[in-house]
Image (cartoon, rainbow, N blue to C red):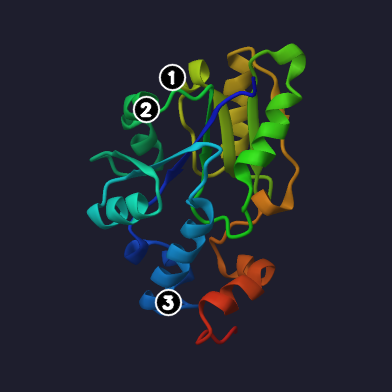
Amino acid sequence: MPDRIALVIPVRSFEHGKTRLADDFTPEQRARLARAMAEVVVAPRGDADTIVVCNDESIERWARSRGAKVALTDARGLNPSLTASRESVLRSTNADWIVIAHADLPLATDIVGTVAEAIATRPQGGDCVIVATDRRRDGTNVLALSRATFARWEFAYGPNSLAAHCAQASRLGLPVIEIDDSSLAVDIDTHDDLHAVRDFVSAVLPDWTPR
């Protein structure tokens, strides 16, 4: 029987996200872009539970309209939010693997399928940590953990999170499997990232003028 997967996506308020793109977009455009990217990741699916972690009522309503479960938290910041919502996530799903994905991956249309392929390659079916990094090999765009490992994982998102997460896997004695997939490597944080997804941005924001 294939391993069951739950996809966990932390989502902050669309209106307050992507502040580093303030020189490229109006606040209204940033909100539309953030929502469009999140809708790619938080897509209705029958192959996995989808759980949105948030502390915003408008995001909760949006997530439920997308067919997702919601783990509400009062915590602020990515690492505290994931830590605070851990028990809620585990109660929401009986999945064997918990996959945390960022909400700004506009090309990531098959996260579950891609991670499932990586899970199938793990050594002798044992435990491991699966990661997909960004184009700079700095961040952790996707992090897949077994249910048992998720229950004790210390989240280390931020600068050099890939190295921090790999180091933690080493301390736990777990091998790391890295997914090399361009669809998971492209996130949008800065002006330079826009060049990789110009067609996506233009489709979402036809009123956008690239600079």
Q: Which residue is mark 3?
A: 29
* Earlier sequence position, callout 1 versus callout 2: 2
Residue at point 65%, 68% (across, down): 197
Q: Amino acid at mark 2?
A: Arg
Q: Amino acid at mark 3?
A: Gln
Give the number of the disc on residue 47.
none
- Mark 3, other Cα within 10 Å: few <14 / some 14–19 / many ≥20: some
Residue 96 at x, y = what percent? 53, 21
Q: Is residue 23 above or below residue 11?
A: below
Q: Amino acid at mark 1?
A: Ala
**Alpha carbon distance from label 1 to label 2:** 7 Å
Residue 57 at x, y = what percent? 23, 53
What secondary structure is marked by label 3?
Answer: helix
Residue 21 at x, y = what percent? 48, 70
Instruction: Evaluate if marks 1 and 3 touch, with contact meaning CB atoms under 8 Å apart.
Output: no
Q: Which residue is mark 2?
A: 86
Q: Is residue 52 above or below residue 35?
A: above
20, 146: nearer the viewer: 146
Residue 155 at x, y = what percent? 46, 31
* Earlier sequence position, callout 2 versus callout 3: 3
Instruction: Evaluate if marks 1 and 2 touch, with contact meaning CB atoms under 8 Å apart.
Output: yes
What secondary structure is marked by label 1?
Answer: loop
Q: Which residue is mark 1?
A: 151
Q: Is residue 83 above or below residue 160?
A: above
Residue at point 26%, 57% (across, down): 58
* Earlier sequence position, callout 1 versus callout 3: 3
Residue at point 57%, 70% (across, down): 191
